[in-house]
Amino acid sequence: MLQRVLLKIEPIHWPLLSPVAASLPLFQTVGSIQHSIWKSHWSSVFDNLPFTSPLVSNICSKNVRNIHHQNSCD
């Protein structure tokens, strides 16, 4: 369901559609999305970076990879 919503927002490559993201628990996936949105927002406020979907997607992708790596090391 979450994937369908994300695809309707903007047709870009969302990292949450990857097999790595599918292996994460839902709370980690949602937390990664929320963190990515807020990080991008505050970067636009303090660093004058544009608040764009590709930037949020890139931050989210990095977060998902980091969480997956941390989970696999445990």
Image (spheres, rainbow, N blue to C red):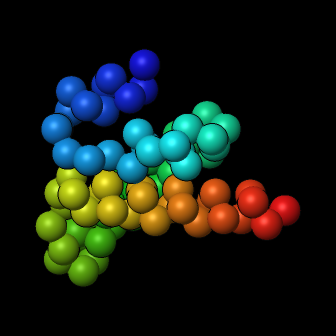
Q: Residue furthest right?
A: 74
Frontmost residue, 38 versus 72: 72
Q: Quadrant of the N terminus?
A: top left
Q: Could you tell me residue 18's position as x and y percent?
A: 45, 45
Quadrant housing residue 24? top right
Q: Is residue 41 visible?
A: no
Quadrant housing residue 7? top left
Q: Is residue 69 visible?
A: yes
Frontmost residue, 24 versus 19: 19
Q: Please name the residue shown 66% across and 65% down the image.
A: 69
Q: Does residue 37 lie above or below 10 as drawn? A: below
Frontmost residue, 31 versus 10: 10
Q: Please name the residue shown 63% across and 59% down the image.
A: 67
Q: Please name the residue shown 42% across and 56% down the image.
A: 60
Q: Please name the residue shown 30% across and 57% down the image.
A: 56
Q: Could you tell me residue 38's position as x and y percent?
A: 39, 56
Q: Is residue 29 left or right of residue 69?
A: left
Q: Residue furthest front?
A: 19
- Number of numbered discs: 0
Q: Could you tell me residue 70's position as x and y percent?
A: 71, 65
Q: Does residue 59 lie above or below 46 as drawn? A: above
Q: Quadrant of the C terminus?
A: bottom right
Q: Residue furthest top?
A: 1
